Image (cartoon, coloured by chain):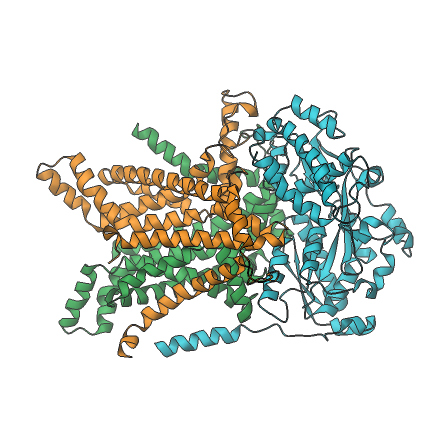
Chain colours: A green, B cyan, C orange
Amino acid sequence: MRRLLQIVLLLLVLLPAVVLLWLSLAKEIGYPSFFDSSFTFDFWKNVFTGGEGLLKSLLWSLGIAFFVAMVSTVFGFIISKKIASSDFGQRSLQLAYLPYLIAPVVLGAMLQFYFTRLGCTGSVIGVMMAQLIFIMPYAVLVFSGFWTPHIKQLAFQATTLGASNYYVLQHIVLPVARSWFFLTFSQCFLISWFEYGITELIGVGKVQTLTIKSMVYVKESSPQYGAVAACMMIIPVLLLFVINSRVFLKKEVEG
Amino acid sequence: MRYGLLFLVSIILASCGNTPQDGDSDVSKKSWEQIAADAKGQTVTMMMWQGDPLINKYMTDFVVPQVKSKYNIQLNIVGGQGNAIVSALMSEMEAGKEKSELDMMWINGETFFQLREIQALHGPFVEQLPNNKFLNWENEFISTDFQQSVNGMECPWGNVQMAWIYDSTRVQQPPMNMAQLAQWVKANPGKFTIPNEFTGMTLLKAWLIELSGSKDGLKGPFNEARYKELSEKLWTYINDIKPYMWNEGKSFPAGVSQLHQLLVSGEVAFSLSNNDAEVDNKILQGIFPKTFKAYVPSGGTIQNSHYLGIVSRSAHKEAAMVVCNFMISPEAQFEKMKPDVWGDATVLNIDKLEGDWKEKFNNIPGRSNAPKRSEIQQYALMEPAAEYMIRLFEDFRKQVIEK
Amino acid sequence: MQGFKKNSAVFLFIAIAVVPVLCGFIYSLLYSVGLAGLLGKGFTLEHWEKLLASSDGLMSIGYTFYLTITTIALSMIMAFAYAWYHFRQPSERSVSKLYLPLLFPPLVAGMAWYFVLSPSGLLSRWSYALGFIQRVEDFPRWVNDDFSFGIILTQFFLVFPIFTLLFLNISKKENLRELYRTALHLGGDKRYFFKNIFLPILWSKGKWVVVLYAIFLMGTYEVTLILGQTNPRTITVFIMEKLSKYNLNDIPQAHAMSVLYSTMMLLFMMILFRLKNWRIA
């Protein structure tokens, strides 16, 4: 029974990946071919030669996601700390849910209106600002779980024993917070990396992240091109995460 | 820290500037020489649908480098079509932005109608283009867009006719009119559906015209009484075959790419395309098997043109005009018409062309699985007024989907 | 002033979280009564009347709730079960696979599951190869189906791993294993521990993430568009269709729906915050 459950779970997780790989490589996808499929790299080739600058898009995507995640994480850490120590902060934390109460498609349309007014559309900075509006509160929410009474107590004790704020931060808080930084950063990075609607609206198509380029294929084109595009969105983050978690986990064990 | 944040915010806000303006505002009074001279060095942003790798390749590998080397114009292609264009321009206007982020775009009928509703188009400008003299204005499928006279407000770019696509190994004799289709659908349950979007509505328009009994059944401005009479027949017809449609008519594909996929995998027997040559293009890309064919039923399908429009608040109208002019040049149109490039029919009158262009156009490698243009022209129907489409959309939901 | 300085970061946070949303809400409200937008012709309640009179608008609200509640309930039950199972027999390898779904954006997940479940999809092909079915038509309908099975499974795929990882993380952080050992040592039984300690602690620490994901699910668009039926549709699909289907005069209805939706969510959250057990502090 347990075995079976494990297999079902494994299938659940792997099936979508399998189907995407197969679609992106199969020459013919007419029913019922699968095991007898012959393979081709043509769809991959066409996507790379068909529209210029995929590599550039990849770099833009990485850059934007990295910056947004960085700022959000740092912001989330600082603000959540202040909130934890503020008299009315805990209640203000409720407000972090607000950006999610508006349907994302409408949030995009209305942000477009205000950003156009400010003259921020069509630029990378505009896109990053728009993303920060809903990613930063999320980072605060994630980090708010870090400031348990235990951590606060620890920091407080160290301070009363004469440690400077800087010392407390560097030697007590940050080491404990390392996994939280990783968690928050990676989640914010993913949200930004996959962000489509708002980037398209605020970027007016001019900020061509990898998601923007891929989504057109996924949405409008044939399943084969869609699958190639989907792989292009997933594989870079997969690599990033494998590397990151290896390095990170190792450090954690050593540390 | 507070000041640091203030500083950061002000830097960010300051870095969001307005697009610098390169050209003069009154382009309509300039001579072509002046326009061409002013266009040099400008950057043009063009918004277009980017869902087809071959079309993208034509733009990035042919048009972009050509306008750069010939006219020193940097052409930026950005993705977006139909409603994305309308909403981008609309929100700019709602926000009172003086200069648009976009300069030109690929549009057709319904977008033309909407952009005119909100007065977002620059023009008339087409008559100023030197290559205007080659355009086939005598063809009413080019000079009229959704029953609206083009009047130089948009520049014709290509011409297509809706075609049905099927697998010749599975369907030997495809139905040629609505009555035959109804029979076929009832005999082959689950194998036919209508996409609930633009292409599907274009099919319904053709059916409305077929039900009227005359090719000119919907000619002229929107006519409420006529629509009521014909659409009632249409809903009766569709609801009659609905139980025999794909998924028992409980759902309809959200897009034509989904319908293509259903055809490839064998769930349905027919797909639709707004481009009569698409089947060849898709076979070349390996997306469709070689047994797929396209045809036009004798009941007729809508033929329409797609156009290039210039944004009224564009800061680079001169360069946009030069790009338009290049895109309707014989060489650009010829390249676009090759089946292995795009297969889009030309909007030029081939008889008017100079030099050996006429011969070149007449010798473009033939279509293989797509029907010949000369054969389907007789079944071409004009686009009815845009209101028909809007009403069909609403009523298809009320009268068919929700029933 | 001293108070302001001390709390300046909190104020900044409030500004970032509240101002854009408030502006958006006001904009939508004005749009829905004809006071904003290019085609607005002055104050009118016409769009609201249209929205409230149409059955499909109200139905979309009910349908969205159905999908969200089913998915969340299913994901939570399975996540509790899996966390409990893993809690007693921990293994790094079985957890690591749960990270894979996190790399799927909703649109891609929707597309992939469509090709797994559809009558001509992967499972159907395997069934054919194994001789279970003879034709495409023999395969049961799991996408665009009456019960929205495809949507629920896809959303489950996206949410279940997050809940499971969250619960495992909480059990680690709260030192539940230690507690478990002590409980067993003192003669408590497994079931008692699960019911009275394990579940309550996971729930009380994790409930806000659950709520957050419920809100996310209410707002998803792509998955329901690909895998759902054309009718009923979810709130976001309703809004998008009104926003983008050729009839510019329908746009105010989209904004009216959005105001309705946001108000409902706001009321829901406010009620939650009032409940004693749900206070964040």
Task: Report x, y in % for residue C167.
Answer: 28, 46
Spot occupied by residue A7 in the image (x, y as percentages of width and height)? 37, 32
Residue B383 versus residue A11: which sits nearer the camera?
Answer: B383
C89 relative position to B398: left or right:
left
Q: Position of residue B152 (x, y in %)?
A: 80, 61
* Quadrant (top left, top right, bottom left, bottom right) of the C terminus of chain C: bottom left
Which residue ends up furthest to the left in the rendered image? C186
What residue sits 32% from the left and 37% below the top?
C78
Q: Is residue A199 left or right of residue B234?
A: left
Using the rendered image of the protein, determine whether residue C109 is visible from the camera's viewpoint: no
User: Where is residue B78, by image quadrant?
Assistant: bottom right
Left or right of C180 in this view: B20:
right
Give the number of callouts: 0
Q: Nearer the viewer, residue B355 or B318?
A: B318
Q: Is residue A252 above or below residue B98?
A: above
Image quarter for residue A73? bottom left
- Which quarter of the picture shows residue C159? top left
Query: In the picture provided, is B157 more to the left or to the right than A126?
Result: right
Q: Is residue B269 visible?
A: yes
Quarter of the image with the N terminus of chain C is bottom left
- The picture places residue A142, in percent across and down from the top left corner, at 32, 57
| Front residue of this view, candidates C61 and B151 | C61
Q: Residue at x 27, y 45 (%)?
A: C168
Q: In terms of depth relative to the viewer, which is nearer, C149 or C27?
A: C27
Identified at 35% across, 77% down, the residue is B2
